[in-house]
Amino acid sequence: MRDVREWTTSLVRLVKRHRDPVVVQALRSSAAATIAYVIALRLSPEAAPLTAPLTALLVVQVTLYSTLTTGIRRVNSVVAGVLVAIAFSLLVGLTWWSLGLLIVAALAVGHLVRVDEFVPEVAISAMLVLGVTTVGDTAWARVLETLIGAVVGLGCNLLFAPPVWVGEAGESIEGLARRVRQLMLSMGEEAAGRTPVEHATARLHEARRLDHDIVEVDAALRQAEDSLRFNPRVKEGLLHRVVLRTGLDTLEICTVVLRVLARTFTDLAKERESEPLPRSFASETGAAVEQLLSEIADAVVSFAVLVTTPVSLNADAAESRLTAELRQAAATRDKLAQLLLEEVQRDARQWQLLGAVLTEVNRILDELDTEHRSRRLLEELDRVSREQRERMPRLTRLRESLHVPEQLRRNRTDAERRSR
């Protein structure tokens, strides 16, 4: 029985590893490069047509959207470089000064044909072609190999859909929320006791470092958004992109407000450092601050879980948990407001800082509010749909003729249900 459990565990681990997007991408790239080389051996006059597998390897990107855009730009860059090399070979040949002119001309042509990040590829292709003896045959063979590699790369992505990176983006968003939660808990614990200025300053620096985490999460989310475009495995790509993007925007706003709150705590610690028993808050007020930050921290994590839960799954539990946590946090906020008022009435010297604490927690609660998120989600969905119609009017008319607006209305209905 134990052997059966171990075998089952190993099988599950193997299946998960093969379904990992990184493993899938490696297998797809290797297969595309091999197929491109086999085809080029039959069609290209070169003995070792390595340009074809190289192009296929570079064209098969992590998403179908980037593959389509990258493939077109890469083919343009190689063809442009070959044409520049042919022109130079007919006029001046290969010398040290002609090589310099060739590189300058190739880079200029790369910017003219707008191949973006593949501008150096134009110069590389031109130098490789100009450096051989039989320029004409090699040039057109390189063009042929490039076309073979690009076609094979595009074909592999059309036949074998690239992995969807939504899961990885969701994990990044949840990881950011948990780091925010941990910082809030630390700030709450220090607020409930005696807070040295050094500790409050350390929390402020930690809050500032969250900006780097947001950049990493944004990169993961951009990759996920690209993986949803033109992907036949995804039915609600637009809704997925809008839900994740608006969720990250909300968390980013919360981190900004949290950084301001950490600054307020630091200023309070500095103001009361000279007192006999330096405390940022009175004993009862500090306990209320700790409780409120703990409840908001839990709500931040629940919010992240809600926005990363697929629409097709049951998200009622996450919605109910977030609503209950926000309701409890609002009650604690009201209690804290009364305690802060009493503290200001006893000593009004730091009333601006104490009022700022209440203002900042109110802002975070407002951002996490489900009604606020509902409006934000619907506004963003309408904005994206409007931009798509304005940018591609012909495609919009085609969609209308195919009754695609019904799908857009379903997306809006799903968004309303998701944001309740």
Image (cartoon, rainbow, N blue to C red):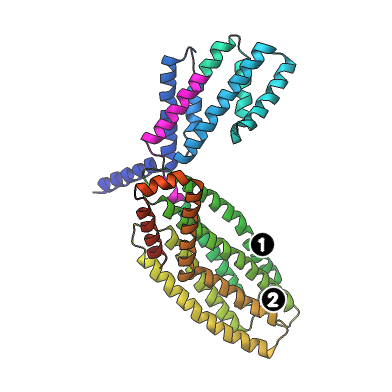
364 left or right of 326 in image: right
Residue ID for mark 2: 268
| Quadrant that contains the C terminus | bottom left
> Can residue 174 be spotted in the picture?
no
**Tag 1 and tag 2, C-beta contact below 8 Å:** no
Q: Is residue 119 above or below residue 271?
A: above
Residue at 62 percent across and 89 percent down: it is 342
What crowding class fits label 2: few (fewer than 14 Cα within 10 Å), some (14-19), or many (20 or more)?
Answer: many
Q: Amino acid at mark 2?
A: Leu
- Tell me which residue sits at (57%, 11%) in the image: 136
Q: Is residue 192 above or below residue 242?
A: below
Tag 1: amino acid: His
Indicate the quadrant where residue 257 lies.
bottom right
- Outermost residue on the top side: it is 134
The part of the chain drawn in magenta is: 143-168
The residue at which mark 1 appears reads as 205
